[in-house]
Image: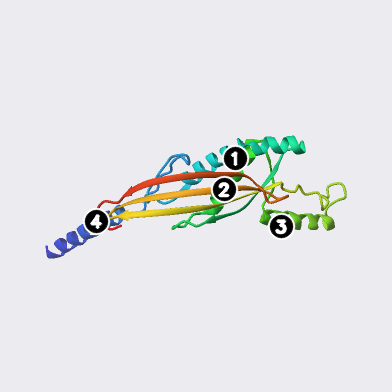
Amino acid sequence: MSFRLHAKQLAVVALTAFIALAGCSTKVSRIDTGEVRDLSGNWNDTDSRLVSEEMIGQMLEGAWVDNHLRRHRATPAVIVGTVRNLSHEHVNVNTFVADIERAVINSGRVEFVASRDERGDIREERKDQDVHATEASRKAMGQELGADYMLTGAINSIMDMEGKTSVRYYQVDMNLISLTDNRKVWVGQKKIKKVVQKPGMRF
């Protein structure tokens, strides 16, 4: 009798442990990439996408595009330079730059030049072709499209806290600079302000 009771107790304990472990297991659900989910209140993928799209929209509507077309009778070529993260938190600048590049290319209003790192890989490939590719398919050196303008920028932030509530302010400043004479032909700015409340925990 006592053995049966002991066995039943072990079974109950094992079942309870199984249920507890099952309740603590990681749960994953897939959502649409365009869906907005603010969890921590920090800069996220939605901020990156919205800022880049609005900023590039402003840039491509600027007078500099038509001025360039009128003076040079050619589509302006743009390259993205350094975008600095000067905010109080980690921001994936590479994702932000990728969003900018996509918006520029999809606009069709300007040519887009590969970045310094990308150009390095392409130049290595051309060197390899000089040795191994056929004459008809080989791509010659010295045929690259030079950029007319460089887009640079910075992400700044200010955070104000009181208890479990904080206000997070982000300011993104972008500059389009002529590589010919260092003139700033366009300056853009986008601001984001968030109120974050965290009940039941110390901020």
Query: Which residue of the protein is positioned furthest toward the right in this rendering?
Result: 135
For the residue carrying disc 1, how many other residues have a C-alpha within 10 Å: few (<14), some (14-19), or many (20+)? many
First in sequence: mark 3 vs mark 4: 4
> In this figure, which residue is indicated by the disc labeled 3?
120
| 52 sits left or right of 147 in the view | left
First in sequence: mark 2 vs mark 3: 3
Q: Please tell me which residue lies in front, 137 or 145.
A: 145
Query: At which x and y percent is residue 9?
Result: 17, 61
What's the distance in space between the residues labelled 4 and 2, CA to CA?
A: 59 Å
| 47 sits left or right of 7 in the view | right
Q: Please tell me which residue lies in front, 28 or 149.
A: 149
Residue 174's disc is: 2
What's the distance in space between the residues labelled 3 and 4, CA to CA?
A: 60 Å
Query: At which x and y percent is residue 161?
Result: 32, 55
What's the distance in space between the residues labelled 1 and 2, CA to CA?
A: 9 Å
What's the distance in space between the residues labelled 4 and 1, CA to CA?
A: 62 Å
User: Above or below — where is 121 with respect to 174?
Assistant: below
Q: Please tell me which residue lies in front, 5 or 23.
A: 23
Residue 15's disc is: 4
Q: Please tell me which residue lies in front, 199 or 178.
A: 178
The kind of secondary structure element at disc 4 is helix
First in sequence: mark 1 vs mark 2: 1
| 133 sits left or right of 17 in the view | right
Mark 1 vs 2: CB contact within 8 A? yes
User: Above or below — where is 101 with respect to 129?
Assistant: above
> In this figure, which residue is indicated by the disc labeled 1?
59
